[in-house]
Amino acid sequence: METNVSYSSFVALGDSFTEGMSDRMPDGGYRGWADLLAQGLASRTPGFRYANLAVRGKLIGQIVDEQVETAAAMNADLVTLVGGLNDTLRPKCDMDMVRARLEEAVTKLAPNCGQLVLMRSPGRRGPVLERFRPRMEQLFAFIDDLAERHGALVVDLYAAEALGDPRLWAADRLHLTTEGHERVAEAVWQALGLEARSDWTEPLPPVAPPGWYRRRGSDLRFAREHLVPWIGRRLTGRSSGDGRPPKRGELAPFEL
């Protein structure tokens, strides 16, 4: 059932997932689930305002240091925080530090917004997910605990079988496609108690798996175009978000 709650302002915090990669628009920018959610909320509430502080590549410590104070000061009706997954995908990860910084963020944000939303992030099926699954599940268990203690909502994207389908992931195997972002926006929409517009958990139609040569060709392109540059940034201490400003740094009216 749809609730009577309305949101007049929304602030999104996070990394590339919340920035909207790889939901590319014709002008070369990215849209993503947070923009889609804002669009839906704006259609219900005149004067709706939206900020998106997310920057690709950010680790949880950077999200806390660079985004949380700004978001808390905005006193928005709705705040979403998604972070920590980039940390878990690093070869070395201090999970105690990740948990401490997440708790710092939630402790600051929860009293300064109407509704805080956290997420159990989706994972693309494959060997990378299996390698990092234990860390991810530690992270998600802590997110559940934080939400219970601070009155936050948790949107469980990780448990949705459909969002693990490789067809909903871009060629870099790290970011969702346009349809993937649309499903995430719908998942958050429904978690807020709003009337369902589609079934975001619906599996994609079955298809025959690609042949060996097609899979190997895809693996080679992925390694050349995405994996090698990612490794290069790790070795040199660089990030894809270095020097990049927030996507939408001011809490301002959102135009449909």
Image: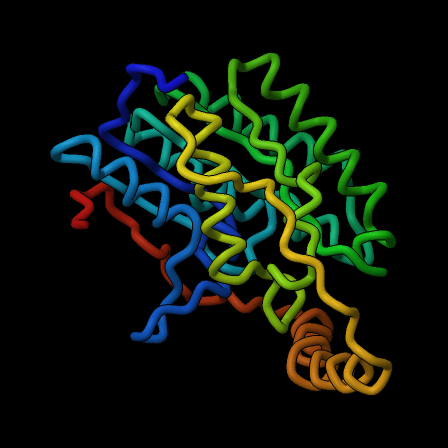
Residue at 30% across, 52% down: 248
- Nearer-the-camera pick, 142 or 33: 33
Looking at this view, is 198 or 61 the one in front? 198
Number of marks in the rendered image: 0
Asked if residue 133 is positioned above or below residue 245 in the image, the reply reads above
| Left or right of residue 181, residue 73 in this image | left
Q: Where's residue 145, x and y in %?
A: 68, 19
Residue displayed at 58% across by 61% down: 175
Above or below, 24 against 38 in this view is below
Q: Where the N terminus falls, by quadrant?
A: top left
Residue at x-position 87% and y-position 54%: 131
In this rendering, the answer to whether 55 lies above or below 143 is below
Name the spot of residue 185 as percent of width and height, x first: 44, 43
User: Residue 121's quadrant in the figure?
Assistant: top right
Residue shown at 82% from the left, 50% from the top: 132
- Asked which colour scheme the image uses, the reply is rainbow
Instruction: Locate residue 80, reporting x and y percent.
Output: 45, 35
Percent coordinates x, y for residue 171 in the rendering: 62, 73
Q: Quick check: 29 left or right of 171?
A: left
Quadrant in which residue 136 is drawn: top right
Q: Residue furthest left?
A: 46
